[in-house]
Structures are given as structure tokens and as C-alpha cells.
Image: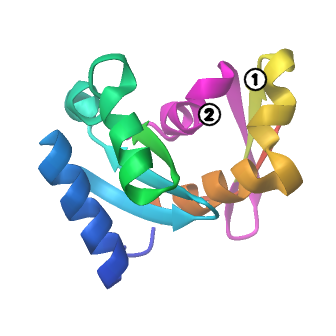
């Protein structure tokens, strides 16, 4: 897993998130039109707020979609956390030359949304996974 470096914009997004939520951010990734924050499990409630209120405030503040992902050392659980909104049922891994491939099985009614327009959600998930695991590719089944 490569070292994670942050640019000035990411540091600003992280500082604003932490100031508003009082949750510690492990990672912040700017991808497509979305900001993805990775937080420890114990900080999830602080990060999201009651009824998702803090996420809504962050959306308005940054004019972007916000995704909060719970970190887990178990790669399969972390992948499931990335796909949480789409009711993931299981994750299977297969070897690749420089890492592993993850296949996430989601509720069939959410499959198209899990993939996203032009594979947007898969690209974002792959970018997050490359920063935190040996997963080099991902698809949805």
C-alpha cells in the first residue's frame, strides 16, 4: 500500500470536515464530483450526524456529493463499507499480477447505481482501495 499524500485542497477539506464533525479523518479523496472521507468506526456517528445532517451541511458547503466510508482492517469489510449504500451481500477476491481484484455482489436492484454513470462509482471505489489495500480493480456483480 503506497503512502498517502495530501494536496492543499484535500488538507482544507479534511480540516473543515474535522472542525464541523469533531471526527478524525484518515483519508480524504477528491474524485469526480465527490469528496470521499474515510473515518474510524468510532467516529461514524460524529461524521454523519443525526439523520445525516452533517453530511447535508458539507454538501452545501463544498457543492459536492459527500461519501463517508468506515475504515476496516479487513479488506472485504472495507470494500463492503465503500458500497454500503447499495446493500453489498458479499465480496470475492481473485489474484491479479500486481494485487487482487474485488468483485462486489450487491442487491440486484442497486447494481446500476453501484456502478454509476460511465462507471463513476467503480472508479472512485478503485481509487480509494488503491490507497488502502492491495486491490487494483473492482467490479459489481
Assess disc 2: are there few (<14), some (14-19) or many (≥20) residues with their C-alpha within 10 Å of its C-alpha.
many
Assess disc 1: are there few (<14), some (14-19) or many (≥20) residues with their C-alpha within 10 Å of its C-alpha.
many
Which dot marks residue 106? Answer: 1
Who's the residue at 57% across and 31% down the image? Answer: 80
Q: What stretch is highlighted in magenta?
A: 71-100
Q: Does the magenta stretch include residue 93?
A: yes
Q: What element carries label 1?
A: strand
Q: Do the residues labelled 1 and 2 touch (CB within 8 Å)?
A: yes
- Residue 77 lies, in percent from the top left, at 50, 31
Q: Distance between the residues labelled 1 and 2?
A: 8 Å
Q: Is residue 40 magenta?
A: no
Who's the residue at 25% across and 24% down the image? Answer: 45
Who's the residue at 21% across and 33% down the image? Answer: 43
Front residue of this view, candidates 41 and 76: 41
Front residue of this view, candidates 16 and 127: 16
The relative height of residue 50 versus residue 138 in the rendered view (above or below) is: above
Mark 1 / mark 2, whichever is N-terminal: 2
Which quadrant of the structure image shows residue 110? top right
Q: Is residue 8 visible?
A: yes
- Residue 89 lies, in percent from the top left, at 69, 17
Task: In the displayed orientation, state which residue is furthest to the bottom.
Answer: 8
Residue position marked by numbered label 2 in the rendering: 83
Q: Answer left or right for 76 relative to 98.
A: left
Amino acid at each position: 500500500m503506497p503512502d498517502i499524500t495530501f494536496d492543499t485542497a484535500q488538507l482544507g477539506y479534511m480540516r473543515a470536515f474535522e472542525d464541523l464533525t469533531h471526527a478524525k479523518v484518515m483519508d480524504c479523496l477528491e474524485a469526480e464530483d465527490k469528496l470521499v472521507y474515510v473515518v474510524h468506526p468510532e467516529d461514524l456517528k460524529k461524521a454523519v450526524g443525526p439523520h445525516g445532517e452533517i453530511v447535508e451541511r458539507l454538501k452545501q458547503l463544498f457543492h459536492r456529493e459527500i461519501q463517508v466510508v468506515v475504515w476496516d482492517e479487513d479488506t472485504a469489510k472495507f470494500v463492503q463499507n465503500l458500497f454500503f449504500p447499495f446493500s453489498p451481500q458479499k465480496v470475492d477476491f481473485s489474484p491479479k499480477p500486481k494485487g487482487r481484484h474485488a468483485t462486489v455482489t450487491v442487491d440486484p436492484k442497486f447494481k446500476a447505481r453501484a456502478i454509476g454513470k460511465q462507471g463513476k462509482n467503480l472508479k472512485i471505489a478503485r481509487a480509494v482501495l488503491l490507497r488502502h489495500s492491495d486491490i487494483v480493480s473492482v467490479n459489481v456483480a
